[in-house]
Image (cartoon, rainbow, N blue to C red):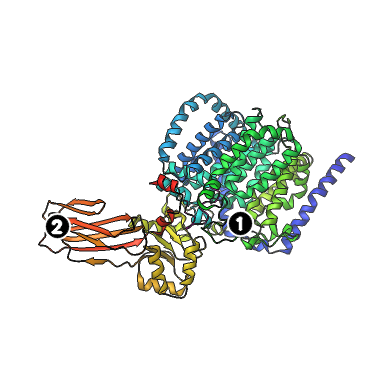
Amino acid sequence: MAATSGYSLRWLLLVAPGMVLLVTGLASSDVLTQIHWRRVRELLLCGALLWLLPSLAGWLLGRSRTVVLCALLLLAIPVLHGLGPTLAVLGLFLLALRLGSLLGLGIEQQPLISLTVGLSVLAALAGWLLPWPMPLLDLLILALLLCVGWLWEQRPALLRQGRQLLSTLHRRSAFWPLWLVGMGWLPAALPSVQFDDLAYHLALPLQLEANGFARLDAYSQVWSLAPWAGDALQGWAAVLAGHSARGAVNLLWWLLLWSGVYRLCRAAALPGTASRSVLVGAAMPMGWMLLGGQQTELPAAAVLVALVAWLIDPAKLGPRRQGLVGGVLTGMLLGLKISHLAFVGPLLAAAALSRPRRLLAWLPTAVPATLIVAGSSYSYATWISGNPVLPLYNGWFGAPQLPVENLFDRRYAEGLDLSDAFGLWFDSSRYFEGWDGVAGWQFVLLLGPLLWGWRHWRLQQPSDGSLLDGRVAMAALLLGALLLFAQMQYLRYLYPVLVIASVPLALGLGSLSQQRPRLATGLLGFVVVLNLLYVPNVSWILRDRILPAGSAGSAAGGVWAARMAPERELIDAALAIDPHASILLGDIGLPYLAHSSGRALTTSWYDPELSAAAAECANDARCWPALWQRAGISHLIHRDGLGPAALDDALTLHARPLRLSQQAALYEIDRPWAVQSPVVPNEAWTIALPGRPPWRVEVRVEGRCLPGSSLGLSDQRGLLQQRNCPSSGRALQRVQWLQEAAEPLQLRATGLQADGPATLHWRARHDLLLARESTLPAWLREARR
């Protein structure tokens, strides 16, 4: 009895401080007033339906409600994201499994790590192939066909894995974790309207799908050469789907992440806690924001979980093969973002102190694998700009694409102090672009169980090849997170470590539940609900809409996306008019370039040259037309009231509106035609093109011809266009082409009647986007020709 009382007192002392901290923080801040109750009601209604439907269907069919819920979620993927993206992700899944097996990880031998390793290899392949024009769709289809035979051979293993999954789903404890993970289907189904996606992340997959290569134009978008592993994998999916498959790919990472956390926690010495780790982790609001975009922290969390699991409990493959797998996972983390060195570095240092000989045995294969998987973006950035981490640290490297200064976001560089321990949870808006209360309330309320679980994190069956145990790994990650946070106080960057912290927290709750099961269940339920109340606070998008507007491609979804970011619709309209249009986004704060497949420019700091030119024109309406002419701008997108008054005046005088979308308008820049008349048939005439090459040249020839005769227009290099004279006898030829040679243009018209009047109209504009491609290395320019 005394022992039981002592145990209860110990847990009271561990749980009570968290309760006091939570109540004190809520009472002393305005975080409770920031709950968006309308969105919360929508979220809770959807959650109730997601509980009710599988429960009723399972009761009527005599099946487990968890199995029915799993089936419903799988069926919802093609409805919400479309059949193309669903099949594309399924293809990536199969390719990743095959690549994982080639590295020695079979379907039945740590399948989650095998899948993560395979996705990492796919991302690395895409990264190295990015600049080269290639038939990517043909390559992917061929690779999938080569996997068919292997897949057929793996039928028994796949069936065994399927039975094991069904066995897991039949457990009573599996329903609520799957329910909470399934709620993540909501933000993943929203269209891509996050700022960073529209300005940067979507560009790479859309360029791969449209052009077969990425432009890598750091003059027009300074982030073009930044680490791109996540976007490169999205590019493979976009090529297979025919358009962006962001939501479906994010669901793959989301499932990998929480399956990995479940496995990591289940391997610990305290049984029955794995479902709790998923519940406390998946309820964190930050993950819901990541599902709606292409930020790197979601795949980084999944890869970091796999790396920690591998360091703690690697498969029995021999040290060189173990090092190869560890190197691939490490390379993927660094290929996603250079700042992940803050996590990788302490982990490797801890491994060197704990198991130096085992780590040395890994290095011969781990180091080359890391360099190959991570190295594509850093290598191309070095070759193209001289700065491997462009646009960061350019004060050191001096790349010509940017001013020679170190880029730093000073909004999140106030320095580390004790107030951050309070501010992260009760004043979260200081640390990212959102509202308060989104850092995860479990780390306040359940701080005691977290520390207890950290102390007792051990494997049920310790591995002979382990480099770390859980306690050391968690300590190393917390040290890395602290170092990263000390440099930049930005909450989103901490998400991968916060996810892994859910494992010791669940272990602590599991230990509490052995003596006080109702208290443990009550605390877990309370913290999950509290986190869900603050999901809308994580993003302005989720405060506007938390439920999908409709099925994939629905009109309602398109209307909502156009309201959030009308620039997407207007870019599509401009490219439909002219596939070679040069579109200028005239609003400094809205550099939504990504959707243009490389045909847009911006006046924001993402394009230093045009940003400086736009600043000079801010108060001079006569300056803007000269800027447009120098840059070869054919169309401009502008939101009313956002730009300087001089820009509005210039558009009134020198452009005409083509289309309106919400508060934004698409303008066509006036470019008058030059006229040459008369044109003598069969004789050459010379045009001196203005400015510098390359030019987009348009020519229109009008005259009389004999019906059925052949009409031709040629320059000094050869024939530009040939067609038959119409029955009316009136010739009208329109030709547009790219002129790269810096020499006068000599044109000749054939087939016109000598006795009839003939007139030539022409105009040309400089193509700044192509001119900037001329700064790429010669070997890359030649490959693209």
Left or right: residue 149 compared with residue 5: left
Q: How many marks?
A: 2
Image quarter of the N terminus: top right
The amino acid type of the residue labelled 1 equals Trp
Where is residue 402 shown, x and y percent of the image? 53, 59
Left or right: residue 757 compared with residue 303: left
Residue with the mark numbered 1: 396
- SS majority, magenta: loop
Q: Which mark is residue 741?
A: none
Give the residue at x 70% y 39%: 273
Where is residue 9 shown, x and y percent of the image? 85, 46
- Between 724 and 356, the residue placed more toward the observer is 356
The amino acid type of the residue labelled 2 equals Leu
Q: Is residue 188 above or below residue 34?
A: above
Where is residue 688 shown, x and y percent of the image? 29, 63
Label 2 neighbour load within 10 Å: few <14, some 14-19, many 20+ = many
The region drawn magenta spans 216-228
Disc 2, disc 1: CB below 8 Å? no
Query: Can residue 237 be seen from the camera position used here?
Result: yes
Find residue 54 and report its image quarter. top right
Left or right: residue 20 compared with residue 201: right
Q: Is residue 285 above or below residue 404?
A: above
Secondary structure beneath label 2: loop
Label 1 neighbour load within 10 Å: few <14, some 14-19, many 20+ = few
Secondary structure beneath label 1: helix
Give the residue at x 74% y 52%: 445
Q: Which mark is residue 752?
A: 2
Q: Is residue 193 above or below residue 155?
A: below
Residue 20 lies in magenta, yes or no? Answer: no
